[in-house]
Amino acid sequence: MTRPPLGQHFLTDRNILQRIVDALDPTPGDVVVEIGAGEGSLTAVLAPRVRYVIAIERDRRLAHDCGLRIADGGLGNVDVVAGDALKQDWHALAVACLANPQSAIANPQLKVIGNIPYAITSPLIDKALTPPLPACIVFLVQAEVADRIAARPGSKTYGAPSVGVQAVCRVEKLFPVRAGAFTPRPNVASALLRLTPLAHPLVAVAELAAFRRFVTACFARRRKQLRNVLLGATGRPAAQVEEGLGALGLDPAARPETLAPEIFARLLRWSARL
């Protein structure tokens, strides 16, 4: 089999497909957006367990073939959408599925799943975490990315992506997936990542963009002490920074990679009051 034009790696191991669907904790009332449907292998395992699947595939040939396979399999609760998932309005697609007379969903849970293209993992996660947030997000990603997002303060991989996602979600790296489970075989290791939005996120919707900019600015100076990091990130005078850190009970000599996400949220609000 030749490599698909958009660089997809198709997952063919039925047991792993089942485990990925299990991780979504599917219920009969769920509406699920699947990113990167490919040949429909994951779609076929998922569809019998939920109310409706909106399967998005950018490659139009693959989307057409996937639609035929799904129809041949007798799965009438799947809508295969040919298009770029980054440009699609996922919630609008879910609303459109509710307008279907055959759909009897009153207030569905929207969930998101996918064996996603590794080259666009970060923007896809950002999009998935744009309000209104889904009830659950399960993505098969490059293992290195999963490590980075799930990293804890003080670890080598902890950084702005870790803080940005953990501020709004519970992050779980569930299990690795071997390269041999894919066709064609990828050159990187993979892992399943589950993101569950927090009932009480550390930052409000209105703060989210500013929070991400602030955290990114802080980690751009990750080797510097917190005092100097905030001087650069906020542009405030040294005396204001020293006073603020004292009021917050934070060590001016601490470094960004040691600070938990809630500390960044407190620092953002402090800087906004200055």
Image: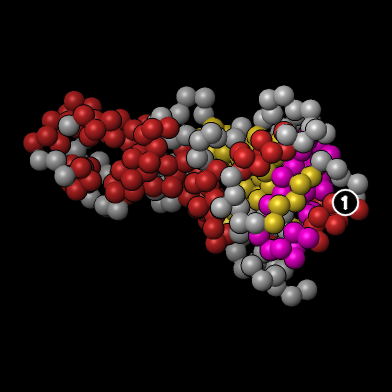
Asked whether 119 or 160 is in front, the reply is: 119
- Measured from the top left, where is residue 74 in percent x and y? 91, 46
Q: Quadrant of the N terminus?
A: bottom right
Tell me the residue that label 1 is attached to.
Answer: 71
Element under disc 1: helix
Quarter residue 67 falls in: bottom right
Asked whether 123 or 21 is in front, the reply is: 123
- Measured from the top left, where is residue 213 in percent x and y? 33, 45
Q: Is residue 141 magenta?
A: no
- Measured from the top left, where is residue 204 in percent x and y? 41, 29
Asked whether the viewer can see residue 50, the reply is: yes
Q: Is residue 54 magenta?
A: yes
The residue positioned 46% from the left and 37% from the top of the image is 166
Asked whether 92 or 172 is in front, the reply is: 92
Asked whether the viewer can see residue 20, the reply is: no
The residue positioned 51% from the left and 40% from the top of the image is 129
Up-down relation of residue 204 to residue 145 (above or below): above
- Measured from the top left, where is residue 224 in percent x and y? 23, 50
| Part of the protein shown in magenta | 39-64
